[in-house]
Image (cartoon, helix red, strand yellow):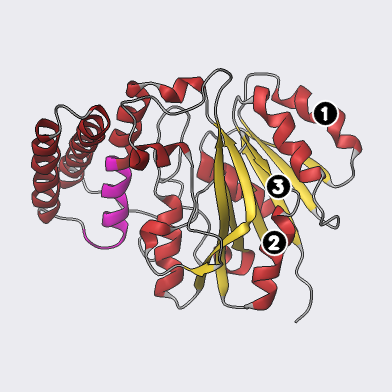
Amino acid sequence: MAELSISAIICTHNRDQYLGAAIDSLLAQTLEDIEVIVVDNASTDTTAEVVQPRLSDPRLRYVYEPTLGLSTARNTGANTANGDILAYLDDDAIASAQWLASLVEVYEKDSKVAIAGGKVTLLWPPGVHRPPAWLSDDLASGLGAYDLGNQVQYIKNPNLTPRGLNYSLRKTFLDSVGGFDVNLGRIGKNLLSNEELHMTQLALKNSWHVVYVPDALAAHNVSPARLKPGWFLSRSWWQGISECYREQVSGRAGVAQLKWGGERLVRGVYKTVKYVNDPAQRFENLAYAYGQLGYLGSVLRYLVKPYKSAKSSA
């Protein structure tokens, strides 16, 4: 099989304190014949100034995208890129030196691989050495940690899909599904999500492969702001809204969603009380229940005023 080209893309919004290290990790890859694209998604900080001195490296390109939204920025990066493979690294992550080489190898070995992503470790803020007592291991995965072991795995369960901060797709696959759904993915402070899970569902449905690649390692900086209960409650709320939308574009919209969400809400409240003496389990279930409120609110809005999704036929 002919060698595949790869484009590494960082979509960034107001993360100038982390961005430089993310770019530098890409320019230091063992795979040298690469393209690196920074998509500045309506930043109002010094993002452009961080990128500017690094543009002396001919592999680096800077693109400004004025429409706020992670999926919009990802689509801009994809449309700008020349690579056969599109590898997305978050602006607050650091790629290991072999990140891109490890990803390319998987795609070259299997022409049916549509999506591949690697292991993610966490970089705690200065002075923090462990999660707070109220944060369970499952809830901490929302900070980006992702580890399915040390062997390559073909993923069949969409819930195990690779993390978006360390994520790649074959460009022909992305084009075939019309790009990222702009109704999913973070938009400013709105923590919409599930875009990667939705992509995995589309890939598996159309007989593509989704792969976990442990050697494609990246480390994710945990912002101090994310170590507060309020951040997890907000994330869970938007997760519920995202899940509602994903069901709707999958053809599962309707009154039955009220039943599903109601049952999950009751279960979450029950377990919050059940684990009242266990801070981590108590808060995990409280966040879960709170997310169902976001889900149910979104269902009710849809039932009152259904909308048409551009991706509904994907």
Of badges 1 and 3, the one in the foreground is: 3
217 to the left or right of 154: right
Q: Main secondary structure of the magenta part?
A: helix
Residue type pointed to by label 1: Gln
**Outermost residue toward the bottom?**
1
31 to the left or right of 262: right
Residue at the image position 61 percent from the left and 69 percent from the top: 172
Report the Cα–Cα distance between label 2 and label 3: 10 Å
Residue 116 rendering spot, x and y as whole percentages: 57, 62
Q: Is residue 174 magenta?
A: no
Residue type pointed to by label 3: Ser
Q: Helix, strand, or loop for circle 3?
A: loop
Of callouts 1 and 3, the N-terminal one: 1
Residue 52 badge: 1
Residue 236 rendering spot, x and y as whole percentages: 30, 36
Q: Helix, strand, or loop for circle 2?
A: helix
Residue at the image position 70 percent from the left and 74 percent from the top: 108
Magenta stretch bounds: 240-252
Q: Is residue 247 magenta?
A: yes
Report the Cα–Cα distance between label 1 and label 3: 23 Å
Residue type pointed to by label 2: Ser
Q: Is residue 265 positioned above or below 150 on the image?
A: above
Number of numbered markers = 3
Marks 1/3 in contact by CB < 8 Å: the verdict is no
Q: Is residue 140 positioned above or below 36 on the image?
A: above
Q: Which residue is mark 2?
A: 102
